[in-house]
Image (cartoon, grey):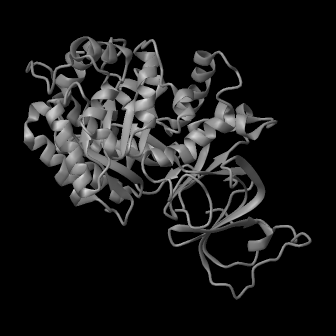
Amino acid sequence: MTPSPAEPPASPGEHAASPAAPPADLIITGCTVLVHDDQERIGFEENAAIVVQGSVVETVTTAGAVRERPAVERLDASGQVALPGLINCHTHAPMVALRGVAEDLPTEEWFNDVVWPVESNLTERDVELGARLACAEMIRGGVTCFADHYFSMDAVARVVEECGMRAHLGEAYFSSQGPQGRERSLDFALRHRGGADGRITTALAPHAPYTVDDTDLAATAELAREHGLPVHIHAAENRDQTDTALARHGVTPIEVLRRTGILDVDVLIAHGTGILARDLPVLRDAPGRTAVATAPRGYLKFAWPTTTPVRALRDIGIPVGLATDGAASNNSLDVWEAMALTALIQKSTTGDPRWLTARQALHHATLQSARAVGLGDQVGSIAPGRRADIVLVDLTGPHTQPVHDLAATLVHSARAGDVRTTVVDGRVLMRDRELLTIDVPAVVAELGERLPALLDRGHGKRIQEYDT
């Protein structure tokens, strides 16, 4: 913790807190704070302070107003920007263990020849170590919450509880696993809902319409209604999947979600680059809360011809959150890169340099991402009553100077490595680039010992067949 320097006297009309005021748990002072107005427009308050009491933001005020306010912990953030913690709206955190093992391959070969054979070797310990490494990467990159969709999720929940992050977790399943797969997904969701002092929310997690049949999807929708759970699913991931669904069944993957009742409940759809114009009214009229997560780096790497139709979805009121997907396809859990790529790709695909603007991209990275994972009333902005999920970004590096447009600097110049401090629920998880809750060298060492067994494909098995 850096001691606060002497601060200037309060300006006219600015009232310092009384020394008798109760101590705050955390005060972050001297920073520029990203705020949202009552129209959800992005703005910035300079020389500001954030007062945290317990796990929530008490107030956002001026630095002078808290000069005399006592605090258990005080962070000097002079010259830094305070942002709501970033949210990775769709990933497979343990797959960092497979980073770089399936390179330069088309989607079908990537799944069938490498990833699904390797995943047949996964043990719960592999999943736990991968999740620890992923959480370390995300904390260092300013990600405070992630939506995960994978196997052996009890291990991921343990990691989340121990490392202090926030997470939206679902145990993935295929119809090939029989009804036991769906039952495990429900059991996980019910056992861990509200876990880690409320930092864990849960979802049912059918893999995709091409690996989960209509009967299982309909049963999942019924379970979601019965237990008040959302659904997290891959759907219309790419145009090939949509074309294949139309050729085989006469409906798009999005229409499958409608006819099986998945769209009647709250649902987070991963990717959606195969969403067609005919799908838009289906999504618009869905009874449940529907959101889409976009992870553009992977689409470029797989050479998919389309991307998530962010503008069309925005026009019908569907929130689009930012994501990285798993590091096996994306090589990175860098949401800063996802934010910049989303803005750039939208400009290119729409032919309009005015869309997405930097401020719009920041809105997707904050409030829209929070809504995508069902936490729109808790995180996504720094405001009184919101959870204290905050990151401090240092913009003094040569690659971020000079600052003519702060929003543009954050989106197009800043990097994950510029995050200095990460706070979740008022707890500091990284201070001045030092991780406080994860021992990375120990994780890397043990994971390295386990890799030969994990990567063995000599058995000729795979957990599933990719056929779209």
Can you say whether 247 is above or below 192 in the image? above
**Residue at horizontal 62 percent and vertical 40 percent from the top:** 362
| Residue 234 screen position, x and y as percent | 32, 31
Q: Number of labelled discs?
A: 0
| Residue 460 screen position, x and y as percent | 9, 18
The answer to whether residue 403 is left or right of residue 399 is right
**Residue at horizontal 69 percent and vertical 46 percent from the top:** 42
Quadrant, the N terminus: bottom right
Camera-side residue: 444 or 362? 362
Residue 13 sits in quarter = bottom right
Residue 407 sits in quarter = top right
The answer to whether residue 306 is left or right of residue 21 is left
The answer to whether residue 297 is left or right of residue 352 is left
Residue furthest to the right: 12
Q: Is residue 4 visible?
A: no
| Residue 71 screen position, x and y as percent | 63, 76
Q: Is residue 103 visible?
A: yes
Camera-side residue: 39 or 104? 39
Can you say whether 110 is above or below 290 in the image? above
Camera-side residue: 386 or 48? 386
**Residue at horizontal 29 percent and vertical 33 percent from the top:** 257
| Residue 155 screen position, x and y as percent | 24, 50
Camera-side residue: 23 or 57? 57
Quadrant, the C terminus: top left
